[in-house]
Amino acid sequence: MDPVRRIVDGRRASTVQRLLDAALEEIRAVEYGDLSVRSVAKRADVSPATAYTYFSSKDHLISSVVWRRVQEVAASFADGADGAELPTIVRSITDVFAQEPELSRACTSALLADDPEVARLRDEIGAACAQSLSSALPPMPSTAVDSITMAFVGGLLLAGMGYMPFEAIADRLNETAEQLRSADGDHTSSQ
Amino acid sequence: MDPVRRIVDGRRASTVQRLLDAALEEIRAVEYGDLSVRSVAKRADVSPATAYTYFSSKDHLISSVVWRRVQEVAASFADGADGAELPTIVRSITDVFAQEPELSRACTSALLADDPEVARLRDEIGAACAQSLSSALPPMPSTAVDSITMAFVGGLLLAGMGYMPFEAIADRLNETAEQLRSADGDHTSSQ
DNA sequence: CCCTACACTGTACAAGTGTCCAGTCAAATG
DNA sequence: CATTTGACTGGACACTTGTACAGTGTAGGG
C-alpha cells in the first residue's frame, strides 16, 4: 500500500523516498510546530509544488513516515516468527516511537488529522498493529483482545504526550494480558 | 480553573459563556473541519477579535467546551459519592462523548493540539478524569491503575475515531479492573 | 536527430488564521 | 453631569497553507 496519493514508480519513487527521508530528518531537527511541507521539500531539494503532488499536507507526510516504519516492524514479524512473545512484539513497536520522541509527538497529532489520506494510512497502521498484536496474544475472548488494544493505543498516546515512559507500555500490557488470559474460563490459572 | 487565557468576571463572564454555548451549537451544526473561531464568534454575535481575546485558537475553544463538560461530571462525583461503582463513573464520562459524537470527533484533534493553553486544559482534564477513575477503583497496585488508565484513554480515542462504540468502554474497563484486582496479592499467575 | 511525454519548477493566487490598534460605547466613579 | 475605565468593535495586517498553471529540462520512442 502506497502512502502517497498517486502511483509511484521510476523517477517518482526516488523523489518520494527523498521526501520521506527529509521529513524524518526535519522531525529530528526542528520543533514539530515549525515543520511544514515546504521546509521538508527544501531539505529534500524538491520544489514545494512537487511535494504537494505526493502529500496532501504536513499530516499526511508525517503519517507516511510512521507508516513506513511500522511496516518495517510488522514485516519482520510477519515472516515466520509465530513464536514471538507479546512483550517482544509490543516493545518492537513502542521502540519505533521511543527512539524518536519527536516522531511520536508529531504523530499523535498527524495520525488523528481530519484528512482522507491520513484516514487511509491510519486504518492501515491500525490494522498492521492489531494483527501483530493479536498474533502474539494467546487465545482469549475477543473482549479481552479489545481491552488490550485499548490499553495499547492509550499507552502510545499517553507516552507520546509525555505522560508516561514508552518503556512501561510493554510491561503494563503484558501484565494485563496475563491476567485476562488466566481469567479465560478458568479461575485457578497456574501455568 | 478558568479555561480562558485571562481572568473572567462581570461582563466578560457572559461573553465567554456565550462563546462556549455557541461553540457547542456550531460543533453540532457543521462539519468539524468547517468550524473556526470566526464562525463561532459570528454565531455568538461577538467580534472575532473579542473571541481571540479569550481563546487562542479553535483547538483551545473546543478544549474549553470539553473541560466544562468534564468538570460538571467530575463535580457530581466529588460531592459525597464515594461509593459510586466504576462502571457508573466511567459511563458518566463516556456518555459525555457518546451523546455528542461531533464533540468527541472534534476533541480527539483539539485536545492533542500543540498549544500551551490546550496543554493546560489537557492536564486539567486528565487529572480530573484520573481522580474520578481512581476514586472508583478498589485498592490495587499503581501499575494496575496505570493499565486501566491506558485502557480508558485508548478507549476514548478509539471510540472518538469511530473504531469502537463508546458504550463498550465501561464494560471492557470493568472487566479489566476485575481481573487486575483479583490478581492483587493473589498470585494466580507467574510474575 | 527530432519530438512527444511528463516529472518537475517558479510563481502567482485564494483562503484561512491569529494579531494589532485606533476608535466606540456603556457603566462605574467623581 | 463630566470623566474615566475597559470591554468590545471593525478593519487592516502579516503569515501560512494548499492549489493552479505556464514553462523547462530530460528521458524514451519514432
Image (cartoon, coloured by chain):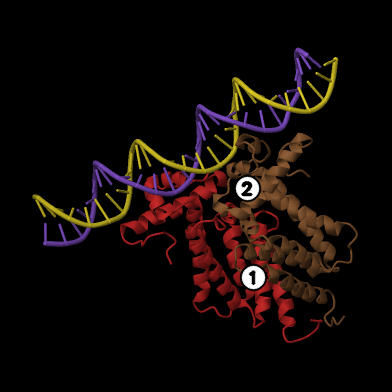
Chain colours: A brown, B red, C purple, D yellow
Residue A145 percent across, percent down from the top left: 78, 65
Q: List the single residue furthest toward the bottom.
A: B185
Residue A74 percent across, percent down from the top left: 80, 57
Residue A9: quarter of image: top right
Say the numbered circle drawn on residue B76. none
Name the residue beneath numbered marker 2: A59
Q: Left or right: where does residue B100 sit relative to residue A62? A: left
Graded by Cα atoms within 10 Å as few (under 14), some (14 to 19) or many (20 or more), the crowding at tag 1 reads many
- Which quadrant of the figure contains the N terminus of chain B? bottom left
The chain that hosts pointer 2 is A
Q: Left or right: where does residue A131 sit relative to residue B88? A: right
Q: Left or right: where does residue B22 sit relative to residue B127? A: left
Q: Is residue C24 above or below residue B169?
A: above
Quote the CA–CA distance across marks 2 and 1: 27 Å
Say the numbered circle drawn on residue B149. 1
Q: How many marks?
A: 2
Q: Classify mark 2: helix, strand or loop.
A: helix
Residue B191 percent across, percent down from the top left: 79, 81
Q: Can residue B31 be seen?
A: no
Residue B15 percent across, percent down from the top left: 37, 54
Q: Can residue B11 be seen?
A: yes
Relative depth, front residue between A4 and A31:
A31
Q: Amino acid at mark 2?
A: Asp
Residue at the spot 59% in from the left edge and 57% down from the top edge: B99
Q: Amino acid at mark 1?
A: Thr
Residue at the spot 56% in from the left edge and 47% down from the top edge: B32
Residue at the spot 69% in from the left edge and 46% down from the top edge: A20
Q: Is residue B131 above or below residue B105?
A: below
Residue A86: quarter of image: bottom right
Residue A132: quarter of image: bottom right
